Image (cartoon, rainbow, N blue to C red):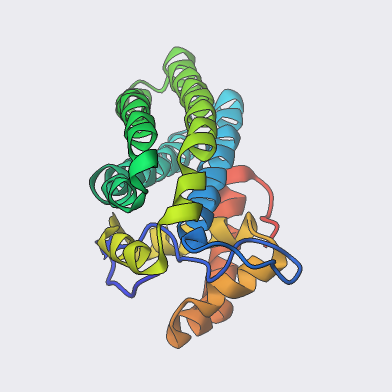
């Protein structure tokens, strides 16, 4: 992640240097860093929404501290998803369409058009989830909590289908045609306003969901002081945050 003060804009994820694999990776075509980034982020958001939906189903309806922990996390995941869609809409897909050969341009544009319709619906669901979460925080009733849980489950289902279609239709084009120079320009434009605590949580979530080799590559992509901060205090604080949220320690 880029260095930023609390509350400033930062990249959504640190970018792995190679594709995820525990063994020595086979050579990948140019652009595979873009595809790898997409797959890592998609997997993390899919899993986090599922975990959050399960936690919401069992959460007490009238405990303000627990309600706040869950709704704050839902807000973070939602903001990450909205920021990711904004980067794709404004930077990634235009760069891809410009990079594909003439014979692939029409199918690429059609896939982007389908993506745009799906992502607009998902963005609306993210905002609906945020509204329901705020209403639960005020009402503190089982009915209000259940609305949030259903909204989160519906969003998780929609994101599953959306990312599966994207990884089928668009991510292979990234792997084939988006070179590292174009990807670097796209990645430099991506940002999401996060506090220091939120950046630490996002980093921990990504590391937790990565294989051993990719964890090393992700950490290697950080600046030296960021790596030391993560190892000295970040891991401990991340574990505490996850225990508060899930009731069990993380796998990192």
Is 197 located above or below residue 171 in the figure? below
Q: Is residue 177 left or right of residue 208?
A: left
Is 134 located above or below residue 91 in the figure? above
> Residue 140: x and y, percent?
41, 23
- Please identify the residue farthest to the bottom as the structure is shown: 224
Residue at the spot x=55%, y=55% of the render?
A: 205
Q: Is residue 79 visible?
A: no
Q: Quadrant of residue 133?
A: top left
Residue at the spot x=50%, y=54% of the render?
A: 175
- Please identify the residue farthest to the top as the structure is shown: 143
Q: Is residue 194 visible?
A: yes
Q: Quadrant of residue 177?
A: bottom left
- Please identify the residue farthest to the right as the structure is shown: 23
| Pick the front one: 245 or 10 | 10
Is 189 located above or below residue 135 in the figure? below
> Residue 233: x and y, percent?
53, 76
| Pick the front one: 170 or 10 | 170
Residue at the spot x=40%, y=57% of the render?
A: 178
Q: Quadrant of the C terminus?
A: bottom right
| Pick the front one: 251 or 212 | 212
Residue at the spot x=55%, y=57% of the render?
A: 206
> Residue 5: x and y, percent?
27, 72
Q: Quadrant of the N terminus?
A: bottom left
- Please identify the residue farthest to the front as the structure is shown: 103
Q: Is residue 34 left or right of residue 99?
A: right
How many marks on residues? 0
Is 223 located above or below residue 180 in the figure? below
Q: Quadrant of residue 57?
A: top right
| Pick the front one: 135 or 40 | 40
């Amino acid at each position: 992640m880029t260095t930023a003060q609390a509350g400033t804009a930062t990249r959504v994820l640190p970018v792995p240097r190679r594709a995820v694999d525990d063994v020595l990776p086979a050579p990948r075509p140019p652009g595979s860093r873009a595809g790898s980034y997409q797959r890592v982020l998609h997997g993390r958001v899919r899993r986090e929404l599922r975990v959050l939906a399960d936690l919401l189903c069992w959460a007490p309806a009238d405990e303000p501290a627990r309600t706040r922990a869950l709704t704050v996390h839902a807000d973070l995941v939602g903001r990450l998803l909205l920021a990711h869609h904004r980067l794709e809409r404004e930077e990634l897909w235009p760069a891809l369409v410009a990079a594909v050969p003439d014979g692939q341009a029409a199918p690429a544009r059609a896939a982007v058009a389908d993506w745009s319709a799906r992502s607009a619906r998902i963005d609306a669901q993210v905002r609906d989830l945020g509204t329901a979460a705020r209403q639960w925080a005020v009402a503190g009733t089982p009915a209000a909590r259940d609305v949030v849980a259903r909204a989160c489950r519906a969003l998780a289902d929609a994101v599953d289908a959306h990312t599966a279609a994207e990884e089928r239709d668009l991510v292979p084009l990234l792997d084939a045609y988006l070179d590292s120079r174009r990807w670097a320009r796209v990645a430099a434009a991506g940002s999401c306003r996060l506090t220091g605590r939120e950046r630490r949580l996002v980093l921990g979530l990504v590391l937790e969901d990565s294989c051993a080799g990719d964890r090393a590559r992700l950490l290697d992509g950080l600046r030296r002081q960021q790596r030391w901060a993560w190892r000295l205090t970040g891991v401990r604080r991340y574990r505490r945050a996850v225990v508060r949220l899930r009731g069990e320690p993380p796998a990192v």
